């Protein structure tokens, strides 16, 4: 039985306390962060961490992020040089996750045997209080493996009921895409995953951060990276088609060809949709906030397919496009390739 913990003002402290006790006793708890919901357990308890992989059906060679709520906790789990530490003191808490050399007390199950660990200091008051009480929490995003990350508690309850010990019922999260991950074990630092913390801001604070082309999401599976980055995520179950050229997107959604498609589009482009549509948002923040939520709406709709437009890869837009590309069954860039969409419907 999963315990659903009320997060309204009158119950919040009691709920967090209960959740912290469950974690200390080796249980699993779904909790909100500012990015997406996490599925957490005591980072120092290997048996508890094993339960995370089981609850999500996650392959054990895909390591977890360790969540902290203070710089003292950081000292228990990872090595960091003074220069970077000072910079992080001006940034954390925030949705910027660092890959660092791990300390020995972090069990192998958390890092899939790697000698590095992802450290995250989330900017969410429920998460911070929970970690304050329970200690460092190992947590991936709370979705079942291969499903889009969970951005609201209703979906968390639907997807994880009876798979975890408790779920904190705290509504929608702030950003809607996961944290940015930067590998700080090498120089220059390297962007491993674009996310809610903009690459531009990270560079202005940390200095040069190398971003390889793969962050765009192309051919991800073909590139041999750290084990954690080889899995596809974020995808709706239905086939989603990305049309990168805006004119071609507008033409497609206003034509008869789009009859079986749910159009995922910006506020401005919604007026062109001839059939059913979902407005992702008025700006790129709203789009990020709604993206995974709307992938699930696509799956629950009566349309067979989805079609989505592209967005500027600036700020959080880089993460939005990364997630869209990874979620897309096919991306077409120009007019010549639009015909491929119809062919792909029969694959
Ligand atoms: O916003 C977030 O980061 C959310 C919330 C819950 O904090 N968490 C999250 O966790 O997105 P997850 O597990 O879904 O994504 C973490 C990514 C995975 O691709 C994982 O493989 C990678 O980070 N990762 C974790 N530890 C790693 C390591 N030691 N080396 C390389 N990649 C690692
Ligand atoms: Mg995930």
Image (spheres, rainbow, N blue to C red):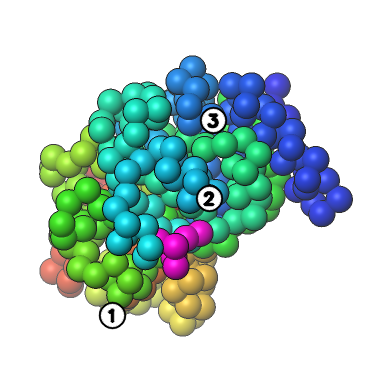
Q: Which mark is residue 70?
A: 2
- Secondary structure under tag 3 reads strand
Answer with the quarter of the image where residue 242 lies: bottom left
Magenta stretch, residue numbers:
88-93
Residue placed under numbered mark 1 in the picture: 247
> How many neighbours does mark 2 have within 10 angstroms: few (below 14), some (14-19), or many (20 or more)?
some
Is tag 1's residue or tag 2's residue first in the polypeptide sequence? Answer: 2
Q: CA distance from mark 3 to mark 2?
A: 17 Å
Tell me the SS state at disc 2.
loop
Q: Height in image: 30 above or below 92?
A: above
Query: Is 312 rendered above or below residue 194?
Result: below
At 80% across and 52% down in the image, what residue appears? 8
Is the stretch drawn in magenta largely helix, strand or loop?
helix
Q: Position of residue 175 (x, y in %)?
A: 51, 62
Please, which residue is most extreme toward the top here?
A: 47
Residue depicted at 50% across the width and 59% down the height: 93
Classify the position of the C terminus by image quarter: top left
Neighbours of disc 3 within 10 Å: few (<14), some (14-19), many (20+) = many
Residue found at x 25% / y 52%: 184
The picture places residue 75, in percent across and down from the top left corner, at 42, 43
Q: Are marks 1 and 2 in contact (CB under 8 Å)?
A: no
Q: Which residue is mark 3?
A: 41
Q: CA distance from mark 1 to mark 2?
A: 48 Å
Q: Quadrant of the N terminus?
A: top right
Q: Residues within 10 Å of mark 1 (few under 14, many from 20)?
A: few
């Amino acid at each position: 039985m999963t315990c659903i913990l009320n997060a309204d003002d009158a119950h919040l402290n009691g709920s967090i306390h209960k959740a912290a006790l469950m974690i200390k006793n080796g249980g699993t708890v779904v909790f909100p962060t500012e990015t997406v919901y996490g599925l957490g357990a005591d980072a120092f308890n290997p048996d508890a961490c094993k339960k995370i992989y089981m609850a999500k059906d996650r392959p054990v060679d895909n390591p977890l992020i360790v969540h902290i709520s203070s710089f003292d906790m950081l000292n228990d789990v990872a090595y960091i040089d003074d220069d970077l530490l000072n910079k992080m003191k001006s940034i954390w808490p925030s949705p910027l996750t660092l890959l660092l050399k791990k300390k020995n007390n972090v069990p192998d199950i958390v890092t899939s045997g790697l000698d590095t660990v992802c450290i995250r200091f989330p900017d969410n008051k429920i998460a911070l209080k929970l970690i304050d009480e329970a200690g460092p929490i190992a947590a991936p995003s709370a979705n079942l493996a291969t499903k889009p990350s969970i951005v609201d508690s209703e979906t968390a309850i639907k997807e994880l009921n009876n798979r975890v010990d408790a779920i904190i019922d705290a509504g929608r999260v702030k950003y809607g895409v996961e944290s940015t991950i930067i590998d700080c074990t090498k120089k220059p630092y390297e962007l491993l995953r674009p996310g809610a913390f903009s690459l531009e801001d990270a560079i202005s604070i940390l200095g040069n951060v190398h971003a390889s082309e793969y962050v765009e999401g192309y051919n991800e599976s073909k590139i041999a990276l750290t084990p954690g980055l080889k899995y596809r995520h974020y995808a709706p179950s239905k086939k989603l088609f990305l049309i990168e050229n805006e004119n071609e997107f507008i033409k497609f959604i206003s034509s008869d060809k789009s009859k079986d498609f749910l159009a995922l589009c910006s506020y401005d482009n919604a007026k062109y949709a001839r059939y059913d549509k979902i407005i992702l948002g008025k700006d790129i923040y709203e789009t990020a906030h709604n993206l995974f939520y709307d992938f699930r709406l696509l799956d629950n709709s009566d349309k067979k397919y989805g079609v989505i437009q592209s967005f500027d890869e600036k700020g959080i837009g880089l993460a939005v496009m990364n997630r869209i590309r990874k979620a897309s069954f096919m991306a077409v860039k120009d007019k010549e390739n639009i015909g491929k969409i119809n062919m792909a419907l029969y694959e």
